[in-house]
Amino acid sequence: MNLIRLSLVGVGVALLVSGCGGRRSNSKVDFSQMGPSINAKRYANLEKIAAKDLKCDVELTPQYLGENQYKMIGCNTEGVYELRCVMGQCAWIPDVRLRAEFDLGCGKDEIQATKLDKVTAGVMGCGKRATYRLLGSRYGYSWTLNSVVAQDETPAPSPKDEVPQPTNL
């Protein structure tokens, strides 16, 4: 009886080690080209988060952007994520554009994000702009709107663009 249990445990461990049963495989990823903080476990976590955010069930293509930032591409969309580590504890910062889609009322592909400082990002899209603040908790990070959504003003026409009106004498 013990021999049967031992053999079943051995087969289970062998399957886990070989990676069978997993939905995705990161064997195509060269971690030496992916920055100093990434490893197989962190990449698997990123892939899971990005697949949910991007609503994409196919294998995603990673692109290292530098400074622990990664672009995940798949299903005709992409998302940018940052890995932040503090004292050995790491968490993925989501793409601010995913949050801004709702507030600005336009698609993620039409939104441009600019990092203003370590915890603040500015976004512009569809003629609107807003500022977001990164909030951290024990379990992860999220972006929150930190300003009113402002409508970009169109510049006033210059005097040379005005056509002189004829005068009747």
Image (spheres, helix red, strand yellow):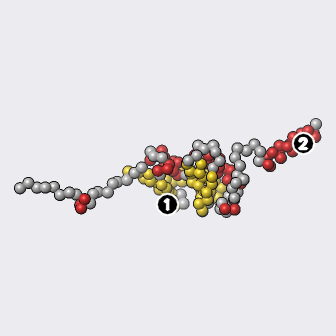
The crowding category of the residue bearing disc 2, from other C-alpha atoms within 10 Å (few below 14, some 14 to 19, many at least 20), is few
Where residue 158 sits in the image (x, y, percent)? 26, 60
**Numbered marks: total:** 2
Q: Name the residue under label 2.
A: 6
Q: Is residue 80 left or right of residue 14?
A: left
In the image shown, does 85 or 100 lie closer to the viewer?
Answer: 100
Name the residue at the top extreme.
Answer: 1
The residue tagged with tag 1: helix, strand or loop? Answer: strand
Residue in the image at 49% along x and 55% along y? 113
At 67% from the left edge and 50% from the top edge, which residue is drawn?
45
Q: Distance between the residues labelled 1 and 2?
A: 57 Å
Mark 2 residue element: helix
Q: From where the camera sits, is residue 69 visible?
A: yes
Q: Position of residue 40 (x, y in %)?
A: 71, 54
Residue 65 falls left or right of residue 41? left
Question: Which image quadrant: the N terminus?
Answer: top right
- Of marks 1 and 2, which one's residue comes earlier in the chain? 2
> Identity of the amino acid at label 1?
Leu
Residue 136, position in %: x, y?
A: 58, 52
Q: In this figure, which residue is indicated by the disc labeled 1?
A: 116
Q: Nearer the viewer, residue 90 or 152?
A: 152
Q: Is residue 26 left or right of residue 70?
A: right
Residue 44: percent from left, percent from top: 68, 50
